[in-house]
Image (cartoon, rainbow, N blue to C red):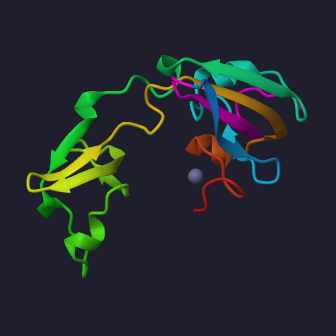
């Protein structure tokens, strides 16, 4: 079965990231046993990856190089912000337990968009957070394999995402 719009595709891959010094370094491995599932043609993955695997079948391999502007975009200084400590309240927890450097916290902006911010430091001014993707500004290289391809259920197409193993449970 060939990959086309509204197929559920499972891929395994190795992701390498250009660290700007030594070159491409290993960042992440997704195995055949625990692949990444997505609904093809619904912007679940970068367009260049969809273009590289369209028409391929289970067992085929692919290799994609993404410049940072085709991946997570440029690193943006304006996504580093200072937020008042009083905004970080969790029931029954002290600020000290919540505000740990390196911790990644899901938050919402004033338009209700979900974003994840990493705590860089905490000082008298507040909580210094970075809402850039950890891979912002990096060139990426995917070496991967098509693990499986199947037809999507109508409900999956309506929702725009995969259900069952590797997908949404609801
Ligand atoms: Zn759904």
Quarter containing the C terminus: bottom right
Residue 162 x %, y %: 65, 48
The correct choice, above or below, for 93 with respect to 49 in the image is below
Q: Which one is in front, 20 or 7?
A: 20
Whether 24 is among the magenta residues is no
Give the residue at the far left of this rendering.
124
Q: Residue at x 20, y 56 (%)?
A: 122
The correct choice, above or below, for 162 with respect to 69 in the image is below
The correct choice, above or below, for 103 with respect to 161 in the image is below
Quarter-of-image position of residue 48: top right
Quarter containing the N terminus: top right
Question: Is residue 132 among the parts visible in the rendering?
Answer: yes
Tell me which segment is drawn in magenta. 1-21
Residue 82 x %, y %: 16, 46
Give the residue at the far bottom of this rendering.
92
Report whether 14 appears left or right of 124: right
Q: Which one is in front, 140 or 122?
A: 122
Quarter-of-image position of residue 140: top right
Q: Residue at x 51, y 23 (%)?
A: 20
């Amino acid at each position: 079965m060939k990959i086309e719009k509204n197929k559920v595709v499972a891929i395994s891959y190795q992701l390498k990231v250009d660290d700007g010094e030594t070159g491409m370094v290993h960042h992440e491995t997704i195995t055949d046993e625990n692949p990444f599932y997505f609904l093809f043609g619904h912007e679940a993955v970068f367009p260049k990856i969809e273009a590289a695997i369209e028409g391929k079948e289970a067992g085929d391999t692919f290799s994609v190089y993404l410049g940072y502007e085709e991946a997570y975009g440029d690193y943006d200084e304006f996504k580093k912000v200072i937020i008042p400590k009083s905004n970080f309240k969790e029931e029954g927890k002290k600020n000290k337990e919540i505000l740990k450097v390196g911790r990644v916290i899901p938050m919402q902006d004033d338009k209700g968009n979900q974003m994840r911010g990493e705590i860089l430091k905490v000082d008298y001014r507040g909580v210094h957070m970075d809402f850039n993707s950890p891979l912002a500004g990096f060139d990426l290289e995917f070496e991967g394999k098509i693990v499986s391809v199947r037809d999507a259920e109508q409900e999956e197409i309506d929702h725009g995402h995969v259900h069952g193993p590797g997908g949404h449970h609801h």
